[in-house]
């Protein structure tokens, strides 16, 4: 089972890494073309994208995923594929109806919605609020395309098909990159701002996610049926699980709303600095946290059908230990190398040295939240698999209340950086409480093994951090110029030496998860 989980997580991680790397390329292109503090366009786009993103998190990826995968897996296990395919069509059609209504309402009330997201200083910049409203209207249908893509992803994951679903978000990044290069330059011919091309690319990316997964799903035997039945027992089960999850995620979105509003009260560029930094922090979450959670959820769902709490406990514990082995070093690496990483990826053309320093500062404070986000992605779906949707919701609401209080205080003390630190603290708090409650529900989480693994990984990561920092200072002294080659040398050299130090430390400390991962990689190269 350990080998199976690692193999599945590896496939998901490889696909997700491809998508995240393309995401960084996308951010690099956008930073070069539109900058951060130099123009209002990226701030307008980032605020506008929060609206469909908010609805996506509520209905498409968040609550729906947590409720749909366990129910679909249970139907597949107990009733077979025909019943599961029917459920898939029912859910797709229900999502189209619900998201369609939301999209239409959002387009109609876009001016009021975007005005609520921004501060008076943001709206005072001529044309900035109007541009934000226009971009919001263009991107809102992205919600419906992503809802369908997410349902398809859930079905394929339940069938243990992980690679293509995990690769599908790459289509969004590819579409955005091509739009920045091909569509944005021609937008002025139609009386539109160039940033509108990126909004159009967002829609194309949503369609691309559907098109990539559709052939794989058809090969598995799925045939779409234009049927709607909100009284179907499985659909009602999904709605029952989604309702409290949506309440909990609504609390999260209240926090996003407040954070965005607070960020718009800071200097121009603050919204974009936070967004660029969060993208970098989300890279290891997607590669390590999401991949492990995605690989674990179908197994946990099957084990929950038979109420095999011991097996669930072992799966969750194994996932947590693997997550720590990957994410603790990633956290330390992001904190130590924040400035050179941001400079390498973003600093060129319209993205200036001041933007690099501001984004790096936000990244350093975001980084500790990496562990919290990743742990929540393992713990929260486990509760849903056990048909307990109340616990993660209650914890989420409490966490958001804590986050809001901290952020309102920290922004006065630290400015926009306080929003990053408060967000990281809330993620850690949310994860800690969920794991503590899950431990009681499952009769333990192999706490001793997890604690020993955490201690060893912390020691190895500290050694790695020191090695990377010393190497960075040495290379910086050797290459004082700020050219592209110098940037690559600083980041690549520091990561290379740091990784070597981590590997040696893991060997000395006998970290089993690291040894297993290394042995698997070596066996593949040997083949």
Image: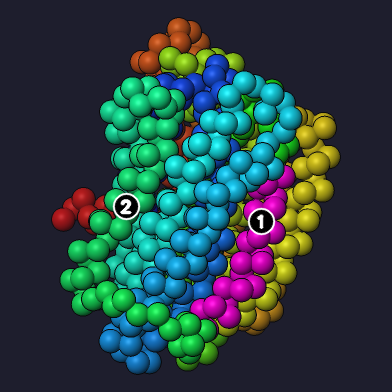
Across and down, in percent, residue 247 comes to 66, 67
Instruction: Say whether residue 474 is magenta.
Output: no
Q: Which residue is mark 2?
A: 207
Q: Position of residue 196 (x, y in %)?
A: 42, 32
Query: Which class describes the residues within 10 Å of circle 1: few (<14), some (14-19), or many (20+)?
Result: many
Of circles 1 and 2, which is in front?
Answer: 2
Quadrant holding the C terminus:
bottom left
Is any part of residue 383 visible from this angle? no
**In the figure, residue 3 lies in which quadrant?**
bottom left
- Foreground of the two, 173 or 190: 190
Secondary structure, mark 1, is helix
Q: How is the image coloured?
A: rainbow
Residue occupying the point 45% across, 68% down: 97
Mark 1 or 2 closer to N-term? 2
- Do we see residue 408 in this rendering? yes
- Residue 146: x %, y % from top left: 41, 57
> Looking at this view, is 310 or 206 the one in front?
206
Magenta range: 237-258
Q: Quick one: which residue is furthest to the top in this view?
A: 481
Point out which mark residue 252 bears.
1
SS class, disc 2: helix
Residue 358 point in image, percent of width and height:
62, 24
Is 256 covered by the magenta stretch? yes
| Residue at 35 percent of width and 80 percent of height | 227
Q: Nearer the viewer, residue 41 or 328?
A: 41
């Amino acid at each position: 089972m350990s080998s199976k989980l690692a193999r599945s997580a590896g496939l998901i991680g490889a696909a997700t890494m491809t998508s995240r790397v393309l995401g960084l390329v996308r951010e690099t292109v956008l930073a070069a073309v539109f900058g951060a503090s130099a123009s209002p366009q990226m701030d307008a786009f980032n605020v506008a994208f929060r609206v469909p993103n908010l609805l996506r998190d509520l209905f498409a990826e968040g609550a729906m995923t947590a409720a749909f995968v366990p129910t679909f897996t249970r139907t597949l296990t107990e009733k077979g594929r025909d019943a599961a395919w029917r459920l898939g069509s029912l859910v797709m059609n229900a999502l189209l109806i619900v998201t369609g209504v939301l999209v239409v309402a959002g387009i109609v009330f876009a001016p009021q919605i975007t005005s609520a997201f921004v501060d008076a200083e943001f709206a005072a910049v001529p044309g900035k609020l109007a541009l934000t409203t226009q971009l919001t209207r263009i991107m809102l249908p992205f919600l419906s395309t992503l809802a369908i893509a997410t349902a398809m992803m859930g079905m394929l994951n339940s069938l243990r098909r992980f690679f293509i679903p995990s690769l599908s978000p790459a289509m969004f990044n590819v579409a955005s990159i091509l739009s920045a290069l091909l569509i944005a330059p021609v937008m002025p011919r139609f009386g539109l701002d160039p940033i509108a091309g990126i909004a159009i690319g967002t829609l194309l990316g949503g369609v691309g996610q559907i098109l990539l997964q559709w052939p794989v799903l058809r090969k598995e035997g799925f045939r779409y049926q234009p049927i709607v039945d909100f009284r179907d027992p499985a659909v009602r089960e999904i709605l029952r699980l989604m309702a409290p999850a949506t309440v909990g995620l609504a609390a999260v979105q209240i926090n996003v709303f407040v954070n965005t509003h607070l960020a718009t009260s800071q200097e121009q560029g603050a919204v974009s600095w936070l967004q660029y930094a969060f993208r970098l922090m989300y890279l290891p979450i997607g590669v390590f946290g999401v991949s492990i959670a995605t690989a674990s959820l179908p197994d946990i769902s099957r084990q929950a059908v038979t109420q095999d709490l011991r097996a669930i406990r072992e799966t969750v514990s194994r996932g947590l230990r693997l997550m720590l082995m990957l994410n603790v070093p990633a956290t330390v690496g992001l904190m130590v190398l924040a400035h050179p990483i941001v400079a390498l990826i973003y600093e060129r053309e319209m993205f200036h040295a001041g933007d690099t320093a501001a984004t790096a500062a936000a990244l350093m404070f975001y980084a500790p939240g990496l562990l919290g986000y990743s742990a929540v992605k393992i713990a929260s779906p486990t509760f849903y698999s056990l048909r307990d949707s109340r616990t993660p919701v209650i914890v989420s609401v409490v966490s958001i209340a804590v986050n809001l209080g901290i952020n309102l205080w920290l922004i006065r003390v630290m400015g926009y950086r306080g929003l990053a630190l408060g967000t990281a603290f809330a993620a850690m708090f949310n994860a800690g409480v969920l794991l503590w409650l899950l431990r009681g529900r499952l009769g333990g989480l192999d706490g001793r093994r997890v604690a020993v693994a955490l201690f060893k990984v912390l020691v190895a990561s500290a050694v790695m951090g020191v090695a990377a920092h010393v190497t960075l200072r040495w290379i910086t002294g050797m290459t004082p110029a700020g050219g592209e080659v110098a940037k690559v040398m600083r980041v690549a050299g520091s990561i290379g030496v740091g990784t070597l130090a981590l590997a040696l430390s893991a060997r000395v400390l006998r970290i089993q998860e690291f040894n297993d991962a290394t042995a698997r990689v070596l066996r593949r190269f040997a083949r």
